[in-house]
Image (cartoon, helix red, strand yellow):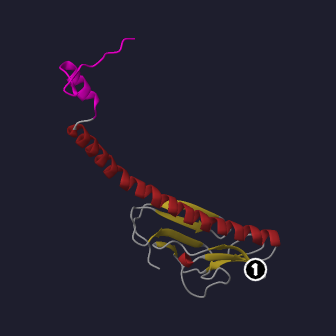
């Protein structure tokens, strides 16, 4: 392989070598501006999509946590052959007399020992039970004291995503995704 030597005149390459050296030196201002324009367009497209994915992930995590609490309460009732309660809780130790599900929840055994607890939800997220139910008691055969429908959503919806957990009388829960775009009032 042959290498070319540049002729240097007054501190710069001469003739055609000068044009070659200049081209290899870097990018022009026009090329840089074009690259910034493309980056701005891609960022404009990606940010809303990322925000929707982040919201979806948080809603899934909250609804999965509530669904897991329902399953734990039901299975503990069957295992211990005694009633088990899932209820709202502000302190993580006792059932709350007032307040909504976003303040947190706990699963209590028949002796009022905490089996599982969930702290308060991040600011801006809500869990609304459509019938105003503050606690669910599971009997030793696994049935729930009542049907319940929980909607997990944002107070100010960013997108049209909510999660709905339905607990039927048999004690089984089902999570589904809705696209209402509104959070039900508490």
Please state if 144 lies on the left or on the right of 7 as rendered: right
| Picture residue at 59% right of the left edge, 81% below the top | 134
x, y percentage for residue 84? 73, 76
Q: Which residues are magenta?
A: 1-26
Q: Is residue 145 visible in this depiction of the protein? A: no
User: Magenta stretch: residue 18 in it?
Assistant: yes
From the image, tell me which residue sits under label 1: 113
Q: Nearer the viewer, residue 52 or 3?
A: 3
Q: Nearer the viewer, residue 92 or 39?
A: 39
Q: Is residue 124 above or below residue 177?
A: below
Residue 18, quarter of picture: top left
| Picture residue at 46% right of the left edge, 61% below the top | 55
x, y percentage for residue 129? 53, 75
User: Magenta stretch: residue 165 in it?
Assistant: no
Q: Is residue 14 above or below residue 73?
A: above
x, y percentage for residue 128? 51, 75
User: In this view, which residue lies farthest toward the bottom?
Assistant: 97
């Amino acid at each position: 392989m042959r290498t070319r030597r540049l002729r240097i005149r007054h501190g710069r390459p001469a003739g055609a070598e000068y044009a070659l050296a200049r081209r290899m030196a870097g990018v022009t201002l026009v090329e840089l501006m074009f690259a910034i324009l493309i980056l701005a367009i891609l960022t404009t497209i990606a940010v809303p999509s990322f925000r929707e994915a982040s919201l979806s992930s948080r809603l899934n995590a909250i609804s999965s946590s509530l669904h897991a609490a329902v399953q734990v309460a039901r299975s503990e009732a069957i295992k211990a052959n005694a009633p088990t309660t899932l209820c709202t809780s502000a302190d993580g130790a006792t059932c709350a007399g007032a307040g909504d599900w976003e303040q947190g929840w706990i699963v209590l055994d028949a002796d009022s020992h905490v089996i599982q607890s969930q702290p308060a939800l991040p600011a801006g997220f809500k869990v609304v039970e459509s019938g105003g139910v503050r606690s669910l008691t599971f009997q030793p055969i696994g049935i729930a004291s009542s049907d319940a429908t929980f909607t997990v959503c944002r107070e100010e919806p960013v997108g049209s995503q909510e999660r709905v957990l339905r607990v039927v009388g048999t004690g089984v829960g089902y999570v589904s995704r809705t696209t209402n775009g509104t959070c039900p009032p508490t």
